[in-house]
């Protein structure tokens, strides 16, 4: 059962990384870094959720994997436009 959780969360992380690349490619670093960060974050999230909650609930584990994967992908985002400096700086 744990093998299916790991494979499912890695696949979920890969899908989320692909969606992020498709929608936010101009704000993300190298494609290989994004495609590695998504599944790594999902696997870590699945591990945390599996450890903290009931291991029998696969949906909660996949939800935890998705949350951590999205959070780790969001750390890769760069600002969209030029940074504005205030007049007092």
Image (spheres, helix red, strand yellow):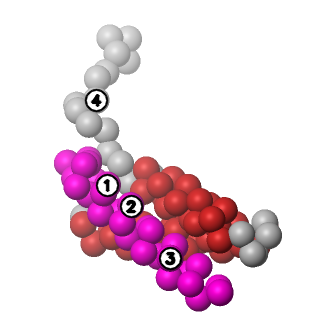
Q: Which residue has dot 1 on it?
A: 20
Q: Is residue 17 left or right of residue 10?
A: left
Give the quadrant of the C terminus.
Answer: top left
| x and y, in percent, of residue 3 in the image | 59, 88
Cα distance in 3D space between marks 1 and 2:
6 Å
Helix, strand or loop status at disc 1: helix
Tag 2 and tag 4, C-beta contact below 8 Å? no
| x and y, in percent, of residue 4 in the image | 56, 84
| x and y, in percent, of residue 80 in the image | 26, 36
Disc number for residue 83: 4
Q: Which mark is in front, 1 or 3?
A: 3
Q: Is residue 48 visible from the viewing direction of this image?
A: no
Quadrant of the rendered structure where residue 79 is?
top left
Please say whether residue 20 is one of the residues in the magenta stretch. Answer: yes
Q: Which residue has dot 2 on it?
A: 16
Tag 1 and tag 2, C-beta contact below 8 Å? yes
Q: Is residue 51 left or right of residue 37?
A: right
Q: Which mark is in front, 3 or 2?
A: 3
Q: Which residue has dot 3 on it?
A: 8
Cα distance in 3D space between marks 2 and 4:
28 Å
Quadrant of the rendered structure where residue 78 is?
top left
Q: Could you tell me which residue is drawn at 42 percent across and 56 percent down?
A: 73
Disc number for residue 76: none
Cα distance in 3D space between marks 3 and 2:
12 Å
Q: Earlier in the sequence, mark 3 or mark 2?
A: 3
Up/down of 24 relative to 48, above or below? above
Question: Mainly helix, strand or loop, the magenta region?
Answer: helix
Which range is magenta? 1-28
Q: Could you tell me which residue is drawn at 27 percent across and 72 percent down?
A: 32
């Amino acid at each position: 059962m744990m093998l299916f959780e790991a494979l499912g969360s890695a696949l979920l992380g890969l899908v989320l990384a692909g969606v992020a690349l498709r929608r936010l490619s101009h704000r993300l670093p190298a494609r290989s870094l994004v495609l590695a960060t998504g599944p790594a974050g999902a696997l870590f999230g699945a591990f945390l959720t599996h450890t903290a909650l009931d291991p029998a609930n696969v949906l909660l584990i996949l939800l935890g994997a998705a949350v951590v994967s999205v959070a780790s992908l969001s750390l890769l985002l760069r600002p969209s436009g030029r940074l504005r400096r205030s007049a007092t700086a």
